[in-house]
Structure formats: C-alpha cells, structure tokens
Amino acid sequence: MKRLLLAAAVSLLAATSAMAQTVYLVRHAEKADASADPVLSEAGQARAGALMLAMADAHPGHIFTSPLQRTRLTAEPTAALHSVTIEPVGFDGGAAAHVASIAERVRALPDDAVVLVVGHSNTIPLIARALGYAEAADMPECEYDRMTMLHLMGDAAHGQVTRYGAPTTCP
C-alpha cells in the first residue's frame, strides 16, 4: 500500500511539474559602446553563444526581447538553434507597460511553455516580479551573467538564479 501511495505521489508530482511554464530571464550581453542602440561587443557575442549553449537542452518555444538590437543579438543564436522567431515587445507606454506586456504574453502561453526573455538590467528583475517571483533582486549595470529560471504554476512562481558564460564582476 505504501508503494502504491508513493508511486501515486511521484506520478502526481511529475504531472504537475510538466504543467509548469518555465521562463528563463537574462539581461542582454555586453554592448560595444554607450550609444543609444549599440551592437554587442566581442565579449557580448561570446556571451550570446554561451546563452545558446546554456539553453541547448531547454528547448524554448518562445523568445521575447525588447526592440533594441542588443537584446535581439543576444537571443539570436538561441533562436537559430531552436528555430524560434524572436518576438520584440516595444516600450510604448514606458518600461512599466513593457514589463506588463511581457508578463501578460508569458501568462497567455500554454501551461507547459518554455520561454526565454532577454531584457535589460532595469527590466529583468521587474519582469520576474510581475510573474510572481517577489525575491528577484535588482540588477546592477555591470552584471551580465545572471540567469533567472522561473517555474510558473498558476499564480505561484518558484525561482532559481544561476550564472552562465564568463563571470562578470562588479566594482
């Protein structure tokens, strides 16, 4: 009887976790300069490649970015690997509207969706919070290697922060 209950519990957990959306949140990779819409630097291009490798087994079916080229360039290797079209989300209405729009789009996806969001140091923590991960820490301007993985189940969000690519150090 105990084995039957244990097997039932394991099956329920497996089914429940299979129904959770998985959302990966990263900031764009290192930029070439301080212009308004820069391309990626050499280090940024390497980080975009590292993101592709980090996402190789995740199989994202949706990729959202801002309309700025540094976010798209960061996402492109991953999008190419998984044959996914990048969906830029504009800043019409400001950063708060951008964050809300991304959260709304993610929440509208199927329960088993895998999503990559590439944003900015000032939007990624806000997007994580908008998706229910209240523990999301602010991101300093010098941090590029943080990857936040969220599992969304209804209104609940469970998160884990990892690092990818070359470590970044902030003064």
Image: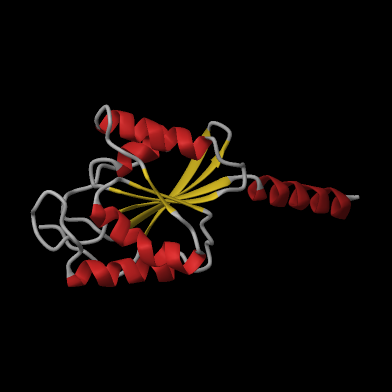
Residue 132, located in which quarter of the rendered image? top left
- Residue 119 picture location, percent across and down: 30, 48
Residue under the point 12% across and 48% down: 36
- Say whether residue 112 is left or right of residue 120: right
Depicted 151 relative to depicted 50: above or below: above
Q: Nearer the viewer, residue 76 or 106?
A: 76
Depicted 138 relative to depicted 54: above or below: above
Q: Is residue 132 visible in the rendered structure shown here? A: no
Depicted 94 relative to depicted 74: above or below: above
Q: Nearer the viewer, residue 123 or 1?
A: 123
- Residue 3 picture location, percent across and down: 86, 55
Residue under the point 84% across and 48% down: 5
- Residue 131 picture location, percent across and down: 44, 36
- Residue 136 picture location, percent across and down: 34, 41
Residue under the point 54% across and 31% down: 155
Q: Is residue 114 visible in the rendered structure shown here? A: yes
Q: How is the image coloured?
A: secondary structure
